[in-house]
Image (cartoon, grey):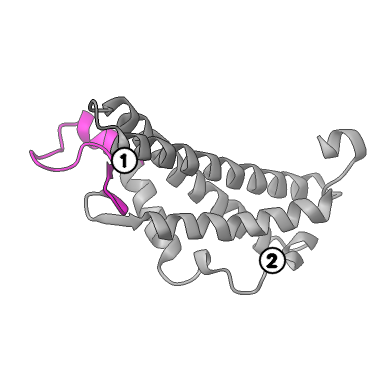
């Protein structure tokens, strides 16, 4: 809306597209995380019945959160590597989600989520193996991949701080 009404944002359309999509996807990952968290709390705190609907919806929100987070990271990397992007000066040199094994863990979990459907449809699934993302008390699990809620919320918070800086700068 800022761009439409007052022309805010990067001047070059390519740069604008990178920044606006990064900010949009970070906001969406926050929303998906919060929605999943609220539903999993509902599941765990419902004592008069089994709130399976809440659990099933929470799984969907966390799947979307991981996929959206990976997309946001891809935009962040594109912003940082763009040769003429002035906005990258607003980002710190060291971004933890881009260092170490964090991005790799997010990518592996995202791939496991996205490729599970194909494995199930092709019959490449053995009895006892996961058929959807498992939501435990302190983490999400799919096969050999585990991400703690505290890690996930920390990564999202980090990206949110960068998105907020970019938004403030261009608004």
Mark 2 and mark 1 residues within 8 Å of each other at the beta carbon:
no
Question: Residue 34's mark?
Answer: none
Which circle's residue, 2 or 1, is located before the other in the chain? 2
Drawn side of residue 90 relative to residue 78, left or right: right
User: What x and y, as percent, mark residue 136?
Assistant: 26, 48
Query: Who's the residue at 42% across and 60% down the image?
Result: 151
Q: Which of 146 and 21 is in front in this view?
A: 146
Most extreme residue toward the front is: 48
Residue 6 lies in the magenta-colored region: no
Query: Who's the residue at 22% across and 50% down the image?
Result: 143
Task: Tell me the residue that label 1 is attached to.
Answer: 115
Q: Which of 119 and 162 is in front in this view?
A: 162
- Marks 2 and 1, Cα distance to the nearest angstrom? 32 Å
Q: Which of the 4 quarters of the picture holds residue 145?
A: bottom left
Residue 118 lies in the magenta-colored region: yes
Query: Who's the residue at 54% across and 40% down the image?
Result: 31
Residue stretch rendered in magenta on the structure:
114-141
């Amino acid at each position: 809306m800022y761009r439409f009404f007052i022309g805010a944002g990067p001047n070059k359309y390519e740069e604008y597209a990178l920044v606006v999509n990064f900010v949009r996807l970070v906001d969406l990952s926050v929303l998906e995380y919060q929605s999943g968290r609220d539903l999993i709390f509902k599941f765990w705190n419902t004592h008069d019945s089994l709130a399976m609907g809440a659990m099933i919806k929470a799984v969907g929100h966390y799947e979307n959160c991981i996929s959206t987070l990976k997309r946001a990271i891809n935009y962040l990397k594109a912003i940082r590597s763009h040769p003429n992007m002035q906005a990258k000066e607003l980002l710190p040199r060291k971004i933890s989600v881009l260092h170490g094994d964090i991005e790799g863990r997010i990518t592996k979990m995202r791939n496991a989520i996205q490729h599970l459907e194909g494995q199930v449809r092709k019959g490449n699934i053995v009895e006892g193996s996961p058929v959807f993302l498992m939501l435990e008390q302190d983490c999400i699990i799919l096969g050999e991949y585990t991400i703690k809620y505290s890690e996930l919320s920390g990564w999202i918070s980090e990206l949110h701080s960068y998105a907020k800086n970019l938004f403030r700068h261009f608004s």
